[in-house]
Image (cartoon, rainbow, N blue to C red):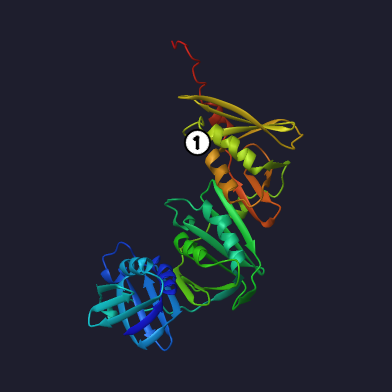
Amino acid sequence: MKVVFERQSLASSLALVHNVVSSTTTMPILSNVLIEAAGEEVVLSGTDLESFGQVRIKANVEEGGRATASARLLTDIVRLLPDGDVNLETAGNRMTIRAARNTYALTTMPVDDFPDWPKVEPQLTIVLRQADLKRALHNTTFAIPTRDPRKVLMGVLFDVAEGKLTCVATDGRKLGKSIIEPVEIIGGSSIQAILPERILTEIDHAIGEEGEIRIAFAERQVVFSLSNLTYISNRIEGTYPKYEAVIPQTFKRTIKVQKTILSDAISRAAILAERKHHSIVLHFTNGQIEINARSFEDGSYEGSVETDYDGEPFRIAFNYQYLQEIFKVAPDAVIEMKMKEAAAPVVFECESDPDSLYLIMPVRMTDIDDVPQPAAAGAVED
């Protein structure tokens, strides 16, 4: 095989494939990228057997062929080469990479050991605007737990029904939801699929604000297709929790808050937040929100910010980390907080994105009230 690449094109393509290649495996071939050259293009493929990635790039193919090489080494080599042409040539079990005054020689592995590209039979296919999918992923993936024995929570639910796609993620304490109107739905009318966070992270990196993406759902797999990029991933098996039942439909209070101002105040309160639940208390009174934090070990904090609230005073407690996560992903400077009771879920919405919402379960006020007051300086305990 003899191929001449443009360095930047090869580097960006390798990066897309490298991210699905297994970094720790008992099968050495899975740490490799498969390179197939024919006609006027080269196909790069990688897999960890849970997901597959394939990129097609234009190149000057002087002699076609197939070979494998370490995805990590090849990616690092091409990334650090100077701009210009990169010449790749194979002979036997050796791959030679030349660029300017640089020459590398890598050991290859048998091509026949590389796993076959899976055959997928879609049950339903949707076409989305890339910008819409990017928005939905941004508004949901933050709510995926870092770890959880319930595997169904370790991804985002893609729920296609009534001509729309609803994306939802939750860890049981916080939730993100976003609705998309597909450009096209093909081959069916409804499906529910839980897609792993890892493949969605790669899709988020690959898509932009322009163009479309095709998503094909099969019984056990999902296929993401862009112009020159294809990802296949296993779906997470199981039934997603009934998320609709958690989201309140009516509210007693809707309060507009300045995101940055409140976030800064919460950061100050977090220094002395109660350690077990990371909790702080928001006390809403006419024209302001009082922010309180209390740590038995360290001390207490009190602060306030202005708001438009003019109703009866009330208190509600939150894990401050969950609030800050929502403030980080919410796009608007002003956010609406919608509340029912002190123990009921609180919904956050943005005017610029009415098809998305965020939800947090508050901390029980009894958990806050049970925290002892810190001893005053110089106090003597019995």
Is label 1 in a helix, a strand or a loop? loop
Q: Which of 326 and 50 is in front in this view?
A: 326
In the image, 37: left or right of 190? left
Image quadrant of residue 55? bottom left
Most distant residue in the right direction: 310
Q: Which residue is drawn at 55% across and 46% down?
A: 325
The location of residue 285, given as percent across then percent down, is 71, 30
Counting from the top left corner in percent of width and height, residue 244 is at 62, 54
Task: Say whether residue 219 is left or right of residue 331.
Answer: left
Question: Which residue is identified by label 1?
Answer: 277
Q: Quadrant of residue 281?
A: top right
Q: Identify residue type, mark 1.
A: His
Residue that appears at 56% across and 64% down: 158
**Can I make out residue 29 in this image?**
yes
Image location (x, y in percent) of residue 269: 55, 32
The spot of residue 251 in percent (x, y) is: 72, 44
Q: Nearer the viewer, residue 233 or 323?
A: 323
Residue 380 lies, with reference to residue 24, above or below; the image says: above
225 above or below 256?
Answer: below
- Identify the image quadrant of residue 85: bottom left
